[in-house]
Amino acid sequence: MKTNLNTKTEITFEDFKTEVLNDYKLAVTSRECSLLGRREVLTGKAKFGIFGDGKEIPQIAWAKAFENGDFRSGYYRDQTFMMAIGELTIEQFFAGLYANTDINEEPMSAGRQMGGHFATHSLDEQGNWKNLTEQKNSSADISPTAGQMPRLLGLAQASRIYRQVEGIDTTNFSRSGNEIAWGTIGNASTSEGLFFETINAAGVLQVPMVISIWDDHYGISVHARHQTTKENISEILKGFQRDEDQKGYEIFRVDGWNYPELMDTYQRAAQISRKEHVPVMIHVQELTQPQGHSTSGSHERYKDSDRLNWEAEYDCNVQMRKWIVSNNIATDEELLVLERAIKREVRAAKKDAWLAFINPIVAESKQAIRLLDELATTSPNGVFIKKLISELEAIDEPLRKDILSAARKSLRYVVSETSSAKGAVQNWINNYIANIQPKYSSHLYSESQHRALNQTEVLPTYNEQAEEVDGRLVLRENFDAIFSKYPESLIFGEDAGYIGDVNQGLEGLQEKYGELRVSDTGIREATIIGQGIGMAMRGLRPIAEIQYLDYIMYALQIMSDDLATVQYRTKGRQKAPLIVRTRGHRLEGIWHSGSQMGGVLNLVRGIHVLVPRNMTKAAGFYNTLLASDEPALVVECLNGYRLKEKLPNNIGEFKTPIGVVETIRKGDDITLVSYGSTLRLVEQAAKELQAVGIDAEIIDVQSLLPFDLNHDIVKSITKTNRVMVIDEDVKGGASAYILDQILNEQNAFEYLDSKPKTLAAQPHRPAYGTDGDYFSKPSVEDIFEAIYDVMHELNPADFPKLR
């Protein structure tokens, strides 16, 4: 069902006819899938459907211009394109609707995303890169509207890097940077800020990006007059059109039902973008959406009769059919025969997809029923178990939930019994969960040999007379070593290039490595992350710098919805090992010393979150991450760049382990847990506590995601029997997360003699000035008194109340 571009300069009419009819067959096949897919949702076999009907012909034109090595970053209406490039069969289309968890049956996401979300496999089963230049590539879709745009920018920028930066091994990733990144978006979604941010950035960077805007005049039920100024996105963006004097975009407009003009437009767009590395915008107008937005509603509710009549006439498939007949390529009768055959083919493939989905589950149900039947015959409560069996047997097409629920409920009736039948059910449940749960929960992080947790710690080493330098110089020297060791590495962000970042951690490196590897960007955090995601997906090792932790909020949606889920939503068949570098923790003022860690921790599962207490630890994290294949957020201490640290002699080689805490002070009376800049205050408080007879042990968390994999904190608590978590985040934020890990994952409550405590910031951002910090976040005195109060409760005689 793949479409082919006939590249001959002269072709016979028969060749031309064959190609046109093949394209029409593909368009009708895709439409039939949409129509039948909607019925599958309405009958309950599928839960939700969102289809590409009405966009078939322009997507076929696009597919003819799409070459091996190219990348797609689209949205959930590109099914015809995926069929046209040979990456989506009819069976796979329906397997996606049914949420088949077998990645061989449903290669887009193994049932983790709803149908319409498309991906190709960049990695083999072991997590190693495939040769991306020998296949057509689709980065895995996400649902948030316009969320695909920032990643599109990075996919395109990778071609520029591969074309212009020397020394990179491009074997699996690029052929002289000739690849185009193709994006798609609905016209309504161009109202999103992510669209405008990406369009502007691509124009500045001049990258080979072609964006198709599918314009059917509606955003769900909302007309274009409520979406776009002048109701025309290309009209209001025509200021981006390049000319002889200024760089910009090439902008095309084409009607989505005009088959020959679409073919010509996409070929011209590809030639310009591929050869000249120029971004191109194709506004595909006058499209339709025959079934409305999705299966959750009908478009007849919001479109008037005139619009519905126009859509019936200017449906792209209808118009192509008329064009075929009027140009004597085929007769109406011949097309009817073709269309009937397609209906039969789609129905048969749909049936095969359903059987492939349901048969394994039915077999699992029969196995569970057999075991439950044996249990019922041996139990005095068999009548109740028989009821569970009857309810399960009555379900002709069970879900795994139905099976497991019945089996688990059966144990409630035999809780006091002992029998081999009960043991068999217990074993079956445990084995079933062990086998089935990974189908829904695996690959949140990398499971390959390259994963970060497989990296071995390498301690920094020092000369006997090691020089004490500003912490920023440790970072700078380490980045220098990184860029020398990894030609595919690069860093970019606001002020990261010419001045070497606001804290001089990259001082002089742009001059040494060039503007493409150490780059300044505009003020656009979301697309900075998007640049990193896209380039990482194409084999580069980007470090995206967000100037301050406070500004991560602009990028958090992209980090959460896209970067954090890449491995998960592809079941390990794509990766984006992006490093996000930022700086935060304590400074002064509302906008430069916020601590959003509680929110970050809950929103970016799938990304490692690392909080080094000094620049040597931070440098070690960068070295660890670049030897692995996973994304991470590294938060450097904003007030630590000018603090003195010894300069290691194994710069670029030492590695800070991920998921490992460090005990930085031994003590017997209480375990203090903290991270980042606050640790320095905790250390000072511990010194002062020593003077009044309180011996505190201090543990640096270092890594929040993952957290203390060796359970070293509970080992400390078995000695001290008391714990306090000190954090500059608001109450209920990171401190609550840390305490939950200590109590519920490490079971520390078994060893506590005192109530576990947290000490966090006030429930507001810090007021400006030194006094603002003192009264907003935990101070040395706050820490001292909180710990002293714990000891007072234990022994009021030795530790009388302070106040």
Image (cartoon, helix red, strand yellow):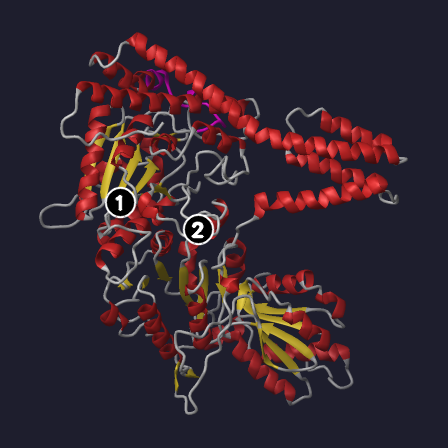
Residue sticking out furthest to the left: 244
Residue displayed at 24% across by 16% down: 324
Tell me the magenta residue range.
294-309
In the rendered image, residue 407, in percent from the top left (x then y), is placed at 75, 37
Residue 514 lies, in percent from the top left, at 23, 66
Whichever of callouts 2 and 1 sits on the residue coming sooner in the sequence is: 1
**How many discs mark residues in the rendered view?**
2
SS state under label 2: helix
Q: Is residue 629 above or below residue 83?
A: below
Horizontally, residue 487 falls left or right of residue 251, namely right
- Quick one: label 2, few (<14), some, or many (20+) residues within 10 Å? some
* Kind of residue sitting beneath label 2: Gln
Q: Does residue 296 belong to the magenta stretch?
A: yes
| Residue identifier under label 1 | 180
Dot 2 corresponds to which residue? 557
At which x and y percent is residue 587?
44, 73
Q: Is residue 721 visible?
A: no
Residue lying farthest bottom? 465
Residue visible at 24% across and 72% down? 512
Q: Is residue 266 positioned above or below 769 on the image?
A: above
Judge whether residue 748 is colored magenta: no
761 vs 145, nearest the viewer: 145
| Number of the label disc, if any, that sits on residue 278 | none
> How far separated are the C-alphas under marks 2 and 1?
25 Å
Q: Amino acid at mark 1?
A: Ile
